[in-house]
Image: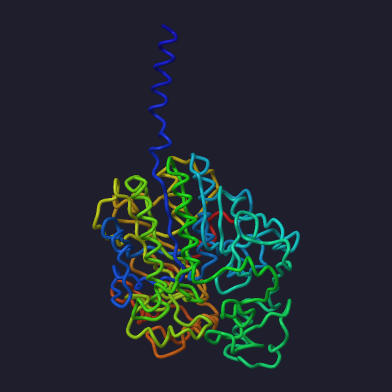
């Protein structure tokens, strides 16, 4: 009798716990510099994204979903940690020489999912630093800590960005295809700060003090051999020339390990598909972090000329193809019904970002930010309001459009609720459970969200957008005040700004003087949100 009781008890206990296979597979496809208006489902006509549109039409599309920052590194940090990046000193745009921002031991999204039985992988752009502060990186040895130390079981990386050296992939801890018989890989960046370097010498292509020999090795640079470039680069990007394009920083050695820009999307797609096939019995988490449409924009030849906005639109077509390939693989393996796919971008669009690649001339009347003003780096809405889609055939009803406010910082808490994970006290301090919003079950989201940019912090609360008094930098606007386009904006003044996004989504009318009490209230709310939460020690 006792044996039978124990047997029945164990059966009941097992039925209460979610089975490993009951948890959905999770795929996040994260674009780079993709604007709200760059998708045809959001109104683009000169760029066509049928695969992404299909996921939107068969799932839910969000019109008020935000990245935490108008710059890439901070957004990625927040997504993976559930913490606003402005809380972490040094969480700006990193070079290849910067140590990893996410400290080993930090509770992260992939670590959370791994603890509840998921196999986790990152494929694509990292840009969160590598190594630690104890020693300089040696690109010919094991590079760690890295993604494998903060929750990912597998990683295949674009370690920084496609406009920076080293132009190599990182497979786990080691440079992919590194051959010991070749000259060792060396990487050196200018001593100047990332954007101080650009701002001080903006457009000064032939400055004598910069036309020096390379900082390492003797490979041609954009300054020493400008005629070897496909198209001119500004001084910041005029380092080592690889594949006809000058990059930020200088490198030498290991030529067999250098990537080929044109096949990068194919490489990341095949790596992702292989991971999905290997983990078909699930559950798995894939963070596919694509470089489209970050500069330099060098699509595979099969996509060149397919859009009506030049190379920038062509690489969005390439991104859409990648999405289609991932969906097709899930379909072929019978995984589609039990896989939630989330698509978004790390920050808003930019046309000129260091290279004269024709993006300005080919843009025409295309609106990369859709109905919103600004773009990458800036505090205006287009810098952080992201094209965002969720699709899960067995759970999310088709055809939903949601205006609920939520942020990528909320993904950790939301996916914890989805998978039954327990988030430790003090971890992911800024993440809120927005799962009912993501699934389309709830129409209201966050009351307020904090946004980071080169213009300082901003607050979106309900219909109101508040940008406090701050000393604004020129460098973000230097990227936008090129050419005769709708993204050509004068620098925002140093005073306070208040916009009503319901009546003025393009943020053209500053209401700060008309509503001083509202400014006072929102300023206090922003101070409360930025000071009251847990800060990393």
- Is residue 518 visible in the rendered image? The answer is no
For residue 353, above or below residue 64 = below
Residue under the image location 71 percent in, 69 percent down: 186
Q: Which image quarter: residue 158?
A: bottom right
Direction left: furthest residue? 399
Residue 387: in sight, yes or no? yes
* Residue located farthest toward the top when viewing the structure as drawn: 1
The image quadrant where one finds the N terminus is top left
What is the residue that sits farthest to the front in this orientation?
A: 181
Q: Quadrant of the C terminus?
A: bottom right
**Residue in the foreground of this view, choosing between 181 and 184:** 181
Closer to us: 509 or 126: 126
Left or right of 259, for residue 498 = left
Q: Quadrant of residue 325?
A: bottom left
- 293 to 288, vertically: above or below: below
Q: Position of residue 296 (x, y in %)?
A: 51, 76
Image coordinates of residue 71 in percent, x first then y, are: 51, 70
At a point 50% along the width and 54% down the height, the residue shown is 82
Q: Nearer the viewer, residue 52 or 104?
A: 52
Task: State left or right for residue 236 relative to residue 271.
Answer: right
| Figure label count | 0
Q: Position of residue 396 (x, y in %)?
A: 29, 50
Q: Name the spot of residue 329 as percent of width and height, x first.
A: 38, 52
Q: Look at the image and name its color scheme.
A: rainbow
């Amino acid at each position: 009798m006792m044996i039978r009781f124990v047997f029945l008890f164990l059966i009941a206990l097992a039925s209460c716990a979610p089975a490993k296979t009951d948890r959905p597979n999770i795929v996040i496809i994260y674009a780079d510099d993709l604007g709200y208006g760059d998708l045809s489902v959001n109104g683009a006509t000169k760029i066509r994204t049928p695969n992404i549109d299909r996921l939107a039409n068969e799932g839910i599309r969000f019109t008020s979903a935000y990245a935490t920052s108008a710059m890439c590194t901070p957004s990625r940090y927040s997504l993976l940690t559930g913490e606003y990046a402005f809380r972490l000193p040094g969480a700006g745009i990193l070079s290849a020489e910067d140590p990893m921002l996410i400290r080993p031991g930090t509770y992260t999204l992939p670590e959370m999912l791994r603890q509840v039985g998921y196999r986790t992988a990152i494929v694509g752009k990292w840009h969160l630093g590598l190594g630690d502060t104890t020693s300089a990186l040696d690109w010919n040895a094991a590079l760690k800590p890295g993604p494998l130390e903060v929750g990912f079981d597998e990683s295949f990386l674009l370690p920084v960005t496609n406009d920076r050296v080293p132009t190599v992939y990182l497979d786990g801890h080691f440079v992919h295809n590194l051959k010991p018989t070749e000259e060792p890989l060396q990487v050196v960046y200018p001593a100047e700060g990332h954007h101080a370097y650009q701002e001080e010498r903006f457009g000064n292509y032939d400055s004598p003090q910069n036309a020096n020999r390379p900082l390492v090795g003797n490979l041609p640079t954009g300054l020493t051999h400008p005629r070897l470039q496909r198209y001119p680069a500004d001084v910041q990007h005029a380092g080592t020339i690889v594949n006809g394009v000058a990059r930020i920083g200088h490198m030498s050695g290991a030529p067999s390990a250098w990537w080929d820009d044109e096949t990068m999307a194919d490489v990341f797609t095949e790596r992702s598909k292989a991971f999905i096939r290997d983990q078909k019995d699930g559950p798995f988490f894939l963070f596919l972090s694509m470089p489209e449409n970050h500069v330099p924009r060098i699509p595979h030849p099969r996509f060149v000329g397919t859009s009506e906005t030049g190379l920038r639109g062509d690489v969005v077509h390439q991104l859409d193809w990648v999405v289609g390939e991932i969906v097709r693989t899930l379909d072929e393996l019978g995984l589609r019904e039990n896989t939630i796919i989330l698509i978004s971008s790390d920050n808003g669009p930019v046309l000129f970002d260091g290279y004269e690649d024709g993006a300005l001339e080919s843009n025409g009347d295309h609106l990369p930010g859709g109905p919103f003003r600004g773009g990458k780096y800036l505090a205006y809405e287009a810098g952080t309001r992201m094209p965002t889609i969720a699709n899960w055939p067995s759970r999310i009803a088709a055809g939903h459009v949601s205006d609920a406010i939520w942020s990528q910082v909320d993904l950790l808490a939301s996916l914890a609720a989805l998978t039954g994970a327990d988030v430790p006290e003090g971890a992911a301090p800024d993440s809120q459970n927005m799962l009912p919003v993501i699934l389309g079950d709830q129409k209201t989201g966050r009351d307020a969200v904090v946004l980071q940019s080169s213009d300082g912090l901003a607050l979106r609360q309900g219909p109101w957008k508040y940008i406090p008094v701050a000393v604004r930098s020129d460098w973000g606007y230097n990227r936008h005040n090129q050419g005769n386009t709708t993204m050509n904006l004068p620098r925002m003044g140093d005073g306070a700004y208040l916009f009503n996004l319901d009546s003025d989504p393009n943020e053209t009318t500053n209401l700060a003087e008309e509503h001083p009490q509202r400014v006072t209230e929102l300023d206090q709310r922003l101070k409360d949100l930025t000071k009251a939460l847990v800060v990393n020690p």
